[in-house]
């Protein structure tokens, strides 16, 4: 049995662990003799992460082909339908306070092609930052550009931005706080799960979309780059692919499970259970109760652990250790609790590891670490990478409408990161996320190939592919990132 769940996996191909030391640390006490270190030996059968259909159909696809897998015309048609419906409801409402000279009376129904241009302009605003929205249409030489004014008048852009909607306010469930955006989230998650399946290791964590407006479920998380915003629970895999998500809308009562346990159990799917996979979580989610529930479905759990969790062995939690020392104990069902002293105490739980150590090289020095810690650091990176890539050239802008923030983050943030990963793995082409985003913008704006900028971009992508093929001989199907 392999000691690390990351060995021989594509997403961890850059990490080759040193030989594992099986010697038990002296500080470990065995109450009932040596524990069964690998009691939960669930067989994992590797499979293809990418849907085989798109491998055969899009082996030579362009960036926009992969983006269309996740954000296709069906989603744009839904946005067009709901935007036009909301505009008509607002204009015909008896409670409308619009004056006779209001610019909203000039509204005309939008179309799919116009909505694509609208989102293309928003994506362009993520590339080129200006002080205010109005500056993108300024004729001042300091701000003048060849994009916004060419494709859409400013008044029309502001009208669509005001009317932009994703669901019918009159027919939605008024008891759901997320009814304005839930249909978009559901469609995106369905598409994301259709074309990619996590490998053996997947990670659950939360992300924060910056928002400082009035919102009953706005969150404050001081550890995030933006401390106020809308919290999204994510299940990610590989180098940042978002496979599932759930928007936090307030505490939900559950008599059987705590909130963190409930989140993990909701995000994981039947497709991921009973397959020997491993869930990686941080100390907000990790608990012995969650580990037991996942073990019942032949799924491992690994994560950092809070010292005050119910069932933690006191002899491990209260142990006074010197730097480099380890104390571990196996509790019920082969669940291991480990404490390791680094710069500070590190408390962890795993149903896969026990007290194995590995020697790694850091700045030319050999350092012995618990294998559990090394594997956790690798597995936990999925959500961090997803957030990091989505933050590049972010299109999220100031708005008083919270659901606009979520929708733009999905359509022009998470969807582009996911499709970029699919593109690189299926085609074998290695391009930067910036180049990929620019190609998507060109397609959304429907810029013709006769445009000099677009010709230059396509020539750059083609040259990059030819250079890579000449260096490697054949293009391997592997996940690569800049």
Image: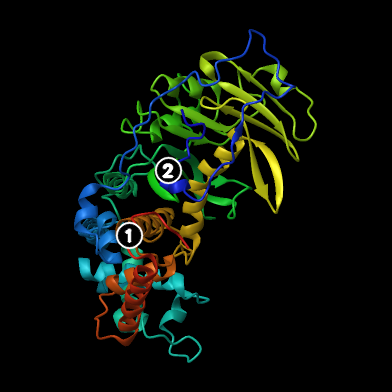
Locate residue 311, reporting x and y percent.
Answer: 61, 17
Viewed as shown, does residue 389 lie left or right of 329? left
Looking at the rendered structure, the secondary structure element under dot 2 is loop
Viewed as shown, does residue 322 lie left or right of 458? right
**Depth check, front residue: 5 or 180:** 5
* Residue visible at 80% across and 31% down in the picture: 322
* Residue visible at 24% across and 71% down in the picture: 114
Q: How is the image coloured?
A: rainbow
Looking at the rendered structure, the secondary structure element under dot 1 is helix
Q: Which residue is mark 2?
A: 9
**Depth check, front residue: 329 or 416:** 329
**Residue 109 shows up from this direction:** no
Total numbered labels placed on residues in the image: 2
**Which quadrant would residue 337 be assigned to in this image?**
top right
Locate residue 92, reporting x and y percent.
Answer: 23, 60
Does residue 148 lie above or below 6 as drawn?
below
Whole-Å distance between the Cαs marked 1 and 2?
19 Å
Q: Which residue is mark 1?
A: 423
Does residue 165 lie above or below 381 as drawn?
below
Does residue 454 lie above or below 401 as drawn?
below
* Residue visible at 31% across and 70% down in the picture: 118
């Amino acid at each position: 049995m392999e000691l690390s769940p990351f060995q021989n996996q594509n997403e961890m191909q850059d990490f080759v662990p040193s030989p594992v030391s099986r010697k038990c640390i002296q500080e470990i006490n065995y109450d009932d003799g040596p524990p069964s270190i690998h009691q939960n030996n669930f067989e994992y059968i590797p499979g293809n992460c990418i849907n085989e259909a798109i491998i055969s159909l899009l082996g030579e696809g362009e960036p926009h082909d992969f983006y269309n897998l996740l954000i296709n015309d069906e989603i744009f048609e839904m946005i067009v339908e709901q935007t036009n419906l909301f505009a008509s409801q607002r204009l015909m409402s008896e409670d409308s306070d619009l004056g006779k000279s209001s610019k909203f009376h000039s509204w005309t129904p939008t179309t799919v092609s116009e909505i694509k241009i609208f989102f293309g302009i928003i994506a362009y605003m993520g590339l080129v930052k200006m002080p205010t929205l109005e500056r993108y249409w300024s004729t001042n030489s300091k701000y003048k550009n060849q994009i916004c004014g060419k494709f859409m008048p400013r008044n029309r852009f502001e009208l669509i931005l005001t009317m932009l909607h994703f669901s019918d306010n009159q027919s939605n469930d008024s008891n759901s706080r997320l009814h304005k955006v839930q249909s978009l989230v559901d469609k995106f998650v369905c598409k994301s799960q259709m074309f990619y399946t996590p490998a053996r290791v997947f990670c659950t964590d939360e992300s924060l979309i910056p928002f400082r407006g009035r919102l009953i479920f706005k969150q404050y998380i001081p550890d995030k780059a933006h401390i106020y915003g809308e919290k999204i629970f994510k299940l990610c895999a590989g180098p940042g692919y978002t496979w599932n998500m759930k928007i936090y809308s307030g505490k939900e009562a559950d008599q059987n499970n705590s909130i963190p346990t409930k989140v993990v159990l909701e995000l994981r799917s039947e497709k991921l259970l009973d397959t020997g996979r491993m869930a990686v979580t941080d100390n907000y989610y990790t608990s012995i109760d969650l580990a037991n529930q996942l073990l019942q479905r032949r799924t491992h759990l690994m994560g950092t652990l809070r010292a005050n969790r119910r069932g933690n062995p006191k002899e491990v939690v209260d142990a006074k250790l010197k730097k480099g020392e380890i104390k571990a104990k196996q509790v019920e069902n082969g669940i291991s609790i480990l404490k390791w002293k680094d710069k500070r105490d590190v408390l962890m739980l795993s149903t896969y590891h026990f007290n194995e150590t590995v020697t790694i090289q850091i700045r030319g020095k050999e350092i012995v670490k618990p294998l559990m810690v090394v594997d956790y650091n690798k597995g936990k990176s999925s959500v961090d990478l997803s957030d990091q890539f989505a933050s590049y050239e972010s299109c999220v802008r100031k708005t008083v409408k919270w659901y606009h923030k979520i929708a733009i983050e999905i359509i022009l943030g998470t969807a582009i990161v996911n499709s970029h990963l699919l593109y690189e793995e299926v085609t074998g082409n290695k391009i930067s996320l910036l180049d990929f985003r620019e190609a998507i913008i060109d397609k959304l704006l429907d810029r013709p190939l006769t445009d000099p900028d677009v010709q230059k971009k396509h020539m750059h992508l083609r040259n990059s592919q030819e250079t890579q093929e000449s260096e490697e001989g054949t293009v391997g199907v592997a996940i690569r990132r800049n």
